[in-house]
Image (cartoon, grey):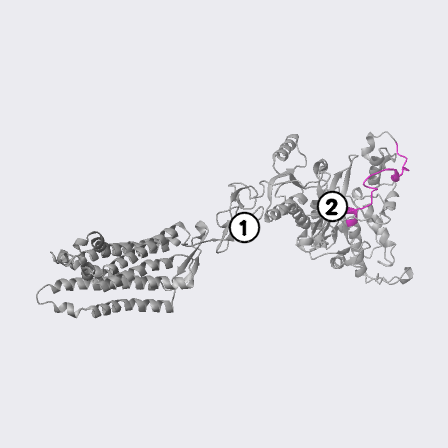
Amino acid sequence: MMTMVFTVDEINRNSTLLPGVRLGYRILDSCDHVHTSLRGALSVVTGKRTEEHIVKGVEERMPGCLAGAPVPAVVGLASSTPTGAVAHTLGPFNIPLVSYFATCTCLTDKLSYPSFLRTVPSDLFQVRGLVQLVSHFGWRWVGILGTSDDYSRYGIQAFTQQLKDQGGCLAFHLTIPNSPSPAGLRAMADTLQSSRARVVVAFATEGQLLEFLSEGTLGFSFPGVSIPGLGEFLLKVRPSPTPGSEFINMFWEELFGCKLDFGAGSSSKSSGLTAMCTGSEDLRDTESSYSDVSRVRISYNVYKAVYAIAHAIHQLLQCDSTGHGQAQEKCNTSTYFTPRQLLHHLKRVNFTNQFGEKVHFDANGEPVPLYDIINWQKVSSGDIKFQKVGSYDGSAPLSQQLQIDESAIVWIGGKSQVPVSLCSAPCPPGSRQARRPGEPPCCFDCLPCAAGAISNQTGSVDCTRCPEFYWSDRDRVKCVAGIEDFLSFYDTMGIILVSISLLGVVSTTTVTAIFHRFQATPVVKANNSELSFLLLLSLKLCFLCSLLFIGRPSAWSCGLRQAAFGVSFVLCLSCLLVKTIVVLLAFRATVPGSSALMKLFGPSQQRTLILCSTAPQVCLCAGWLSMAPSIPFRNSSYQGLTGMVVLECKEPWPPGFYLVLGYIGFLASLCLLLAFLGRKLPDTFNEAKLITFSMLIFCAVWISFVPAYVSSPGKYTVAVEIFAILASSFGLLLCIFAPKCYIILLRPERNTKKTLRKG
């Protein structure tokens, strides 16, 4: 109140602001109550004086007014609830109401409060700053303590929503009633003590929670300044017996602990005092918040409000502030102005005061949202020291709004370490949060990331899948290149298959050597040595082609493996087909009159049939290789299970493989059919039985190969095909040549023409 009086006097002494125009004032006490505030507002509107509400701590000054209303503008009030009631009343009359301390966000509503402005930031910005402060220190589990007024109710509502948006949670919400009972206070205390939340956000005035705030509190305060001349002005106040001076008199008696003898003018609260006041006591000898004007904050908001109104009137009256002195005053004082006109100019006021701060209002009547962050620190004497530890500028970019000097903060118990307030500790890298059913999001368990996923930050909500061809490490904190898996020459399986393949080559070479060594014997001659050697060569190629399936897939190995496999087996089956036909014709040639059949199917015809049977497969493989050859491929479909990246050969044209396999099956079936027809030939011609048995093994192997090939994963697909190649090759080698080698090496007495002709 006294700051407003001081500001009016300062403006009246200023020759550049409102030259030739003097401001007056009328002061009413709202008692911080809605009913009393409304009575005062009605007296402002109607012009009727309500003496019981007029505060005459200083002389009421109402000079001849240019305004067309009893009071063209109002500065006040402090609390949000009475302010809302008064603003709602003054709004239809377009009388500006500039508040210096009402911060409720609800007052931003221009439909309900069209004439309301304020020099104090809305709770909206205070809440944003509080949420940023809570987030800055990593507090995710906080309690809220409030009162039953609009400031607390709307502030808590906005804070709760924004806290949830930032990932925070409420541990509890306590509301202190106007008249709390001891049982209710004990229940609140129990809630505070039992909660895991170590941080409580309070929405209340300092008077309501004074003891609570004395523990190291951090709070948002308005920027403070030192107003020149204000301190001396306040120290000149003196009590007076003049009616209406009760406010000053009550202050004087309470400050000095004595009683004023002013009769009816003295305060009713002084009845219990015995010492008498002289009225000449010196305010300089006392220490109180009244005389401490080193950095005034709320009073500074009053100072800006009065100056804003003065500047608005300055613009309204079209004042020219270039002159000095009464002789050069240039304000248009010839006509009256209305509160509506003043409100219009007040909304557009924009000036920089003597402290370098820009004073203006936005579309909602809000000022620039500036705050100091204050730390309540206990000093050695037990008193509270207000230490500025940071600032908040709601108009700055988001990353620059909050500025904190953590080293200057003293926490509860004099500690310098930031307290931790979490429902659950942040999950370490390599794990993720898992919500607990029925509990807030801030309460969670930590689960390890699944295979193939990582989290490399503390407090990760989810794990991130590794990109293709990468896999999580053992700790699930980083992605590493997936392990390449293929049938290697150094794997146990690879070594076994290579050994079996080489055994087959050695065995075939040994049989070839035996046949070559004993090619002049009847057994070798009777089995058509040329066909036998060609068959042995094709079997050797079958064993060798299996080696192309082992090792790291490359462009040449992928293209060659299936072609080599297809041509080798077709050559082998073509030889068996011709051999089967020769056996059948040889039996028919023993029948009288049928000797011409063997002459029609001589060696040249046999070679031609082998060539004609092999040529289709050669053409098919050549076309396949030229048009759509197999290519190396990194298969990540198994990565989700094992982390392995399987290196394999991809078939751009899958029907090619099945055509090759189908042609092999066709020749094998034809051989089996012809051999089966000759199964009952005399023992002398038992070659057909051996071919039949070998074809049964061959067909059984390759029929079982198809489902095994389709269902086998990764490198086992290749292993299945190699096994089928080796098994069928060994089946042919053993069934066709083992009996002959047995006779040649172990039963030479049977290797005669006479023995072969028996039967």
Depth check: give the residue in front, 689 or 372.
689
Depth check: give the residue in front, 570 or 408.
570
Residue furthest left as drawn? 592
Whole-number angstrom distance, CA of label 2 to CA of label 1? 39 Å
> Which residue corresponds to mark 1?
478
Q: Position of residue 657 (x, y in %)?
A: 33, 62
> Which residue corresponds to mark 2?
389
Magenta segment boundaries in residue numbering: 276-301
Q: Position of residue 720 (x, y in %)?
A: 34, 54
Q: Residues within 10 Å of mark 1 (few under 14, many from 20)?
A: some
Q: Kindly tell me whether residue 596 is visible in this rendering.
A: yes
Amino acid of disc 1: Lys
Q: Residues within 10 Å of mark 2 (few under 14, many from 20)?
A: some
Q: Quadrant of the C terminus?
A: bottom left
In contact (CB < 8 Å): disc 2 and disc 1: no
Amino acid of disc 2: Val
Question: Depth-wise, is mark 2 or mark 1 nearer the camera?
Answer: 1
Compared with 393, 566 (above or below) is below
Identify the element where label 2 is drawn. strand
